[in-house]
Image: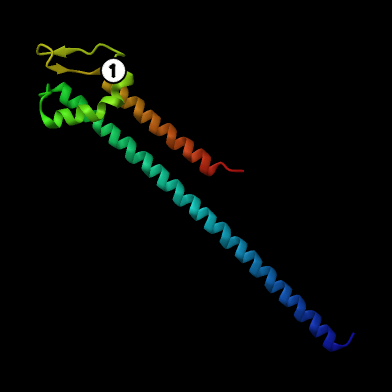
Amino acid sequence: MNDNQRDDNNQERRQDLRQDEETFRLRQEEGRLRTAQRSNTYIWIVNSIYWLGGLIEILLGLRFILRLFGANTQNEFARLINNLSAPLIAPFSTLFISPTSDGGANIFDVNIVIAIIAYALLSYLLISLVRFIFYNRV
């Protein structure tokens, strides 16, 4: 083999190495991009669950406070809170008999407390499920 052939072979090897390096870098960058996209989706889902769970907790907390302090049920705000929270409290509404005072005006509604705890646990479980789905891939 003469020097020109060796130089050509060396140059071909260098080009092959450069192409292999570029392919490797491209695959690494594609992996980083997929990870970033999955991370953004995960964050969006988790934040949505936190937001929805927080909204439910606030709504139920307001209902609890209004009932505890005997708010006027004819008041627009009290009606709004009661109407919005009614579907959320429905599964728990007949679970316990709640103690009252002042002739039934002030109600410590145990069912609302149970609902608040249940929705908080449900939010936690949903976030755990999302975390499992996104970060326990094989």
What is the residue that sits farthest to the right in this orientation? 1
Residue 11: x %, y % from top left:
75, 81
Q: Taking 53 as reference, is 58 left or right?
A: left
Which residue corresponds to the image point at 14% horizontal and 32% vertical from the top-left?
77
State the image quarter where residue 28 is shown: bottom right
Q: Taking 55 as reference, is 46 left or right?
A: right
Residue 90: x %, y % from top left:
30, 21
State the image quarter where residue 125 is shown: top left
Residue annotated with mark 1? 93
Residue 8: x %, y % from top left:
80, 83
131 is higher (above) or lower (below) than 18: above
Which residue corresponds to the image point at 44% horizontal and 51% vertical from the top-left?
40
132 is higher (above) or lower (below) than 2: above
Q: Amino acid at mark 1?
A: Ser
65 is higher (above) or lower (below) than 130: above
Which residue corresponds to the image point at 31% horizontal and 24% vertical from the top-left?
115
Residue 91: x %, y % from top left:
33, 20
Image quadrant containing the C terminus: top right
Which is nearer the eye, 87 or 9?
87
Image quadrant containing the N terminus: bottom right
Which residue corresponds to the image point at 25% horizontal and 11% vertical from the top-left?
97
